[in-house]
Amino acid sequence: AQTVTQSQPEMSVQEAETVTLSCTYDTSESDYYLFWYKQPPSRQMILVIRQEAYKQQNATENRFSVNFQKAAKSFSLKISDSQLGDAAMYFCAYRSAGRSQGNLIFGKGTKLSVKP
Amino acid sequence: DTAVSQTPKYLVTQMGNDKSIKCEQNLGHDTMYWYKQDSKKFLKIMFSYNNKELIINETVPNRFSPKSPDKAHLNLHINSLELGDSAVYFCASSRGPRNYEQYFGPGTRLTVT
């Protein structure tokens, strides 16, 4: 069974600085997708960024980028120029590409605080 | 326009009661999901339906019964509510079970007293 591990329960960053959130996963599959979701206090789950395992190039979305290391099964999220609105829970998630079932497998989350 | 909506957003009820949470998506998606987020914020899949057909049924008590009257709706009915059912329940949808983009509803916070 696939598992996702986020080893940092909480992180803190100064406004305008850069922070990296860690995520590792375990799978025997070769084709899959990885995601970072943001959950602010409003509770809404917001997709931040996604990465297809077959792509070597790291995904980037504005201030958000990932460092995808397939051999190491590592998928970290870098937030540049942190803003107060980035404060939230961040969840790393895995989804198999090959199976007919499409559910996401989540890590336990990292709570990010942004200091003004 | 809300893509995935859930009602109610908050639900407070007593042990032993039966309650339902409704989910509707207007995205034309074929696949819908129910996730449970516990008090420690851990999210886990409960059920998934594709074209009104159940395709995922994780280890969830029989007191939980999903119902999909059509592709746009996936409701969650819970019988004989217990304290441990208190959680946030999220509905989500995607174009298909293999499509990777999942859109989440706003969540329903269920509190059982």
Image (cartoon, coloured by chain):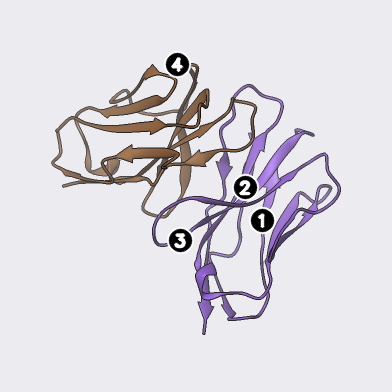
Chain drawn purple in the picture: A
Precedes in sequence: disc 1 or disc 3: 1
Check chain identity for marks 1 and 3: say if they share one.
yes
Disc 3: which residue? A40
Disc 2: which residue? A4
Chain drawn brown in the picture: B
Secondary structure type for disc 2: strand
**What's under tag 2, amino acid-wise?**
Val
Q: Position of residue A45 (x, y in %)?
A: 48, 50
**What's under tag 1, amino acid-wise?**
Cys
In space, the residues marked 2 and 1 are separated at their CA atoms by 7 Å
Report crowding for label 2: few under 14, some 14 to 19, many 20 or more residues within 10 A (C-alpha).
many
Report crowding for label 3: few under 14, some 14 to 19, many 20 or more residues within 10 A (C-alpha).
some
Q: Position of residue A65 (x, y in %)?
A: 72, 60
Secondary structure type for disc 3: loop
In space, the residues marked 3 and 4 are separated at their CA atoms by 31 Å
**What's under tag 4, amino acid-wise?**
Lys
Q: Nearer the viewer, residue A24 or B3?
A: B3
Q: Nearer the viewer, residue B45 or B105?
A: B105
Residue mark closest to the camera, 2 vs 3:
3
Q: Position of residue B101 (x, y in %)?
A: 61, 38
Residue mark closest to the camera, 1 vs 4:
4
Disc 4: which residue? B52
Query: Residue A85 vs residue B90: left or right?
Result: right
In space, the residues marked 2 and 3 are separated at their CA atoms by 21 Å
Picture quarter with the N terminus of chain A: top right
Disc 1: which residue? A23
Query: Residue B93 vs residue A25: left or right?
Result: left
Q: Nearer the viewer, residue A1 or A79?
A: A79
